[in-house]
Amino acid sequence: MKKDDINTGVLLDELPQGGKPDVSAAWNRLRGRMRESHGRVPLRAWSLAAAGALSVAVVLVVTVAPLRAWAEDLLAIFRVEHVTVLDLNSSSIQGLENNQVFNQAMSHILSDNVTISEPPRPPQPVADAATASRLAGFTVHLIAGKTPNSLMVRDAIIAQMKLDRDRLQSIVDEAGRNDLRIPGSVDGAIIGLRVPAGILASYGNCGEPVKMTFKEKGWGARLGLAPQTASQHADDTCTKLSELPSPTASFPQEVDPAEIAQVGLQAAGLSPTEAANFTQTVDWTTTLVLPVLHGQTTYENVNVNGIEGILLRPRLAGASGRFDLLWVDNGIVYSLMGTGDDTTAINLASQIE
Amino acid sequence: MVMASTWVEADFENVFREHFERLVRIARRVLHSDAEAEEVCADTFLKLYRSGQGVLAGGAVGAWLCRVTTRASIDRLRRNRRRGRREEQEELDADASSADDGCHDPLSRLMRDERIADVRSALARLKPVKAQLLLLRHSGLSYQEIAAIMQIKPASVGTTLARAEAEFSAIYQKQHRLDKRTARLEIAKEG
């Protein structure tokens, strides 16, 4: 066939329009679905652990890049070996935090598209490191010479998230970036997420637990390593150590996480060039990326027993001197939260054995 | 900041009754049955209902509905294509049974249905945004309406459409050449 032989307009105009729909019957069916949707579980009703798992999922979905190249038969697997920071423009993220439609869309994704295989139990208190190691399935290390006031073991979480392109697109649209397009290949794909059992040890006066706002949570809490609570009447002696074997995420081969990462980073406020540069400078297959808000958190790379870690400090009023030190050692992600200068933080971390 | 306010059911029903039929007709152009087109449109309305009226802050409800429906239809078309030839055959059957075809001669009807399947297949191979643009344009929408729906500058609609049509044409012709080659091979085998 020669190029001139076809008339695109004629071909496209020939597509059928179908019969006249029964609008009233369609409305009745839709009304039934609308009423069902009123009974959906809201975001706040999710367990803290599930929210933690989702945080990991979101971080991974947004940030993991060239997993496609991994030579797995069916799935690409992500494992954390390093931690790094992504400094984000705070105004774009704060806009999202205050955007009710955006939050509602996220809530719908949680309630409709994330399945937790087995709801985790509340964290279980245990007597000592040996018991914690047995229950958690890895060797637990605590701060030498100190006895924790409480030692808790949190269950593993196995979750699946079915990607819904339209919903993800609506989130990107709501983030003010309707110029960005979520690739069609993600639609219906299932991402698997496994967050192994972990532990939390609390030392000193950590007071009574109270709910924390997102801004108040350290990364340990955001990732499900530590409870999503702060401690009322806690003082500067309070130190919390959480340990968690590397979470893993799996992607079907037809999904290109690089494409998703590019969209996610741009939706989070990076320019296309910045997003491309960032994805090229990080080994995505082994790095957990912690987004922090520019100007609200300071961070620096530090050396913890010969391993590179990240020391984060919030710039919140009343949080003076607080630190959150994260590093990965032998497949275990550590988070140490406390109060003190850099030397105090690193010394405490070096006493973990 | 966009505020989400929930819908009053009567208001929402009015929106539904005003737009549903038109959206189904657009979606049906790329989907193989009336039922599938209605399902995609119902999903769009449910999304609108769950999102509250806040999603409309950026524009008119008709444009929003059209954007989401056409995008969902193209995505469904692409998914159908991945499912393979069996569904394509069902698609042919569904279109053959539609009442508005105006083809009474079985051979003409068969050829027309094959052309429709080829057009849809070529649309499914295009980038979704381009397929969306072509679908909107050939559903009878003006450049101005397309600009509002796709949230692009009216001045760039013509150029973007021209590019989309050129790509569509190239894909369609490539498909056609492959089909002819396959047919010749089959005839050679039989002969």
Image (spheres, coloured by chain):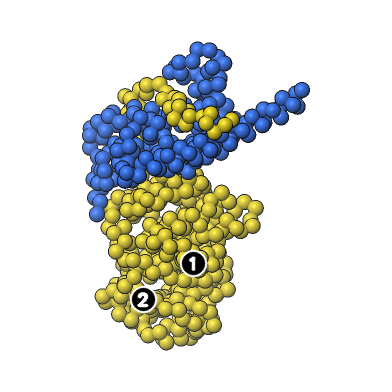
Q: Amino acid at mark 1?
A: Leu
Task: Please tell me how crowded label 2 is: few (under 14), some (14-19), or many (20+) other residues with Cα within 10 Å.
Answer: some
Please count the marks in the image.
2
Q: Give the residue pinned by disc 1.
A: A288
Chain for colour blue: B
| Amino acid type, callout 2 | Thr
Q: Is residue A146 above or below residue A227?
A: below
Residue A39 visible within the image:
no
Residue A122 spot, x, y in % from top left: 43, 61
| Any part of residue A177 in sight | yes
Looking at the image, which residue is at 47% across and 54% down? Answer: A260
Which label number is shown at residue B9? Answer: none
- Reply above or below: A163 against A67: above
In terms of sequence position, does the residue under pointer 1 or pointer 2 come before the other? 1
Residue B151 appears in which quarter of the rendering?
top left
**Dots 1, 2 in contact, CB < 8 A:** no
Residue at disc 1, secondary structure: strand
| Residue under pointer 2 | A298
Query: What residue is rendered at 40% in x and 51% in y?
Result: A180
Mark 2 element type: strand
Give percent across and percent down for residue B62: 29, 36
Parent chain of label 1: A
Report x, y in % for residue A56.
46, 61
The residue located at (42%, 39%) in the rendering is B162
In terms of image quadrants, where is residue A137?
Answer: bottom right
Residue A182 in percent (x, y) is at: 44, 49
Quadrant location of the N terminus of chain A in the rendered image: top right
| Image-based side of B56 in relation to B182, left or right | left
Q: Tell me which chain the residue with mark 2 is part of.
A: A
Q: Nearer the viewer, residue B164 or B116?
A: B164
Figure check: A130 above or below B26:
below
Q: Which hue is chain A drawn in?
A: yellow
